[in-house]
Image: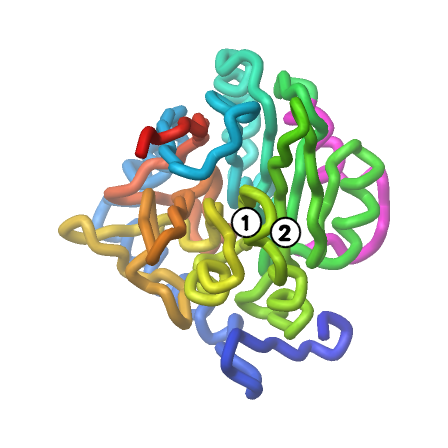
Amino acid sequence: MEREGTKRQPLHTAEVKHWDAFLFLVRIFRFLLIILGLYKKGQKNALALETVHHQQKFKNLPAAFEKTRILHLSDLHIDGMPELLKILKKQLREIGPVDFCVFTGDYGVSPLKSEDPNHPMVSDMKEILECIDSTHPPIGILGNHDSAHTVSLFNELGIKMLVNQKLQFEKDGEVLQFVGTDDVHYFYGPQSLKCLEHCQEHFTVGLIHSPELFDFAAEAGVDFYLAGHTHGGQIRFFNRPLITHLDRGKQYSAGNWKYRQMKGHTSVGVGTSGIPVRYGVNPQILVHQLIREES
Ligand SMILES: [Fe+2]
């Protein structure tokens, strides 16, 4: 699909959205921000990274995984704002030990065009990983800005890249399972739904770049759905996102949410794309702590 330039979203078979037309509008918008004197403030907001902690309660969390801490990083777009890397590294060092670290896609703005281990994005990721103190190896998935080359390069860095795959961890005879899909916003394929099958057999954390599979994942038995993609709109007016880049599930474009029995969190992301500015939604590093909820 990537080679042929085919883009497909869930429930759609035709090609969707023209990125070039969108980028043209972005350039006009950037010009307006400069004219209005708002651009520098937006850049400052985009660097105001904060770490946000959430307690996520589940009735069916296995006892062995009580108080599990998951560091959740999304939409780093690390080549979009070079100044952000230093700030991100400092805050990651301050977080301390976590049990798991998950990346929900969009590592850069420009997709990797080859499997070049000397690409700056690979060395930036290496530096980021050195600042993370995780018991288990980091887990990653692809976003719509990532090419297939990312998979082998990041696997080499020690990130377990899940492309329509499951990964299980066992503790005291109990299992915590991660399921990670390929990007479903531009590169949706039925394999993404296939890999979600039988999730109800274990407590499952779903890693899916966008929240657009919310109903499919809940049906399949995912317990906790972690996503990104939207940047929380990146620009919000009256606390509403200007653009979500979602074809469905727009109501789950930022923060904690719930659909039927499944809980979810859509990260507002670390980086920016389009224009390196944010208004009304600052970047976030997330730490989710899983807690057993007494029935
Ligand atoms: Fe993104």
Q: Which residue is mark 2?
A: 180
User: Which quadrant: the N terminus?
Assistant: bottom right
Residue 168 visible in the current orientation: yes
Of labels 1 and 2, earlier in sequence is: 2
Position of the C terminus, as image quadrant, is top left
Magenta-tinted stretch: 110-129
Residue closer to the observer: 206 or 94: 206
Q: Is residue 121 magenta?
A: yes
**Label 2's element?**
strand
Secondary structure, mark 1, is strand
Mark 1–mark 2 CB contact (< 8 Å): yes
Q: On the rendered structure, is 159 left or right of 75?
A: right
Considering every residue shown, the one lying at the far bottom of the view is 14
Q: Amino acid at mark 1?
A: Gly
Residue shown at the point (49%, 15%) measured from the top left: 95
Marks 1/2: CA distance? 6 Å
Write down the residue under mark 1.
Answer: 206
